[in-house]
Image (cartoon, grey):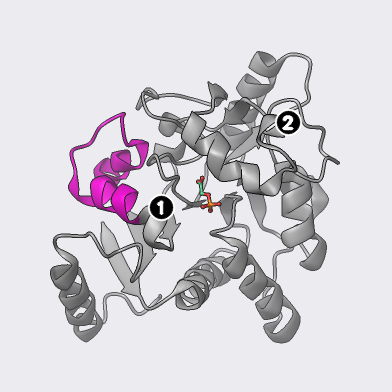
């Protein structure tokens, strides 16, 4: 696990965008796992800038989003469909047929979840999965207690998640109570994971995920078992890390060895 501590949200976003862009240059038909929420917004803006100013090419990229609220149609302004088109897809040259986002408005969600899993496999699995983290330590909407081997399915959202996401809705009561999310087993099969965290409200979840026991209580802790994980945390999100000095020292030492040139 590589823990990269950066100054602030802007530096986190730029660093993450550069890593993804490097992967895309190496493999133009990269299968990218994407996340929603406030955290990746800066990275998405940077993708748009890189596409417009530097010609970053998404024409062969395939993308799978982590999750979607149940009960919201894809044109609902709070749906993750809407979010992804508004914040990223409408501004880059990704092909619409290469975009996959779970649907929250299907009649039979179970059949949809099975289809989504099959589609991920058919495309060769995610090369790089982008992740945010919830205050309760979730990745995707894998709330505490999620099976570490879970696949794409419906999850009931915790009160904490509903409170956190109420800021996007007019009233807390409007926040859907269920979501379709890739499972922890699904996420673990990505070849590489890149988790982003910013702000003091993520500090506890970040410390437990990186330094606590692997546990279904903090589902991001599962990443400790993954062979290729990068976590980019800003100073505020990294403030509780016990080994913070070591992670910073290790990054400097790795630069000397030139093993991390790509990012
Ligand atoms: P946020 O959400 O980026 O809006 O903080 C992260 C998450 O819940 O996974």
Q: Is residue 19 visible in the rendered structure shown here?
A: yes
Around disc 2, counting alpha carbons within 10 Å, would you say few (fewer than 14), some (14 to 19), or many (20 or more)? many
The N terminus: image quadrant: bottom left
Q: Name the residue rendered at 40%, 24% in the picture.
A: 146
Residue 132: x %, y % from top left: 48, 51
Per the rendered image, the range of residues in magenta is 203-226
Q: Is 206 positioned to the left or the right of 118 in the image?
A: left
Give 173 or 24, whichever is nearer the viewer: 173
Q: Is residue 213 above or below residue 129?
A: above
Marks 1 and 2 sit apart, C-alpha to C-alpha, by 25 Å
Give 187 or 120, whichever is nearer the viewer: 187
Asked if the residue at tag 2 contacts the one at tag 1, i.e. Cβ–Cβ closer than 8 Å, the answer is no
Disc 2, SS = loop
**Residue 192 shows which numbered tag?**
1
Q: Front-most of 70 and 223?
A: 70
Percent across and percent down for residue 83 are: 73, 51
């Amino acid at each position: 696990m590589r823990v990269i501590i950066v100054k602030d949200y802007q530096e986190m976003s730029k660093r993450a965008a550069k890593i993804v862009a490097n992967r895309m240059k190496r493999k133009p038909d990269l299968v990218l796992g994407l996340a929603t929420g406030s955290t990746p917004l800066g990275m998405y803006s940077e993708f748009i800038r890189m596409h417009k100013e530097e010609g970053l090419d998404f024409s062969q990229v395939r993308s799978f989003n982590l999750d979607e609220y149940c009960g919201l149609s894809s044109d609902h302004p709070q749906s993750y469909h809407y979010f992804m088109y508004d914040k990223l897809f409408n501004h880059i040259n990704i092909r619409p047929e290469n975009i996959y986002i779970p649907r929250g408005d299907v009649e039979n969600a179970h059949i949809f979840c099975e289809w989504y899993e099959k589609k991920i496999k058919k495309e060769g699995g995610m090369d790089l999965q982008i992740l945010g983290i919830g205050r309760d330590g979730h990745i995707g909407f894998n709330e505490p207690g999620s099976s570490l081997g879970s696949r794409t399915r419906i999850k009931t959202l915790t009160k904490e998640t509903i409170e956190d996401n109420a800021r996007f809705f007019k009233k807390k009561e409007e926040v859907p109570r269920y979501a379709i999310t890739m499972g922890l087993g699904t996420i673990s099969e990505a070849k590489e994971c890149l988790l982003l965290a910013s702000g003091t409200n993520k500090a506890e979840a970040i410390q437990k995920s990186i330094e606590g026991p692997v546990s279904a209580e903090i589902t991001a802790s599962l990443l400790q078992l993954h062979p290729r994980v990068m976590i980019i945390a800003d100073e505020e999100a990294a403030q509780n890390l016990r080994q913070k000095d070591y992670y910073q020292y290790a990054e400097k030492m790795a630069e000397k060895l030139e093993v991390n040139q790509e990012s």
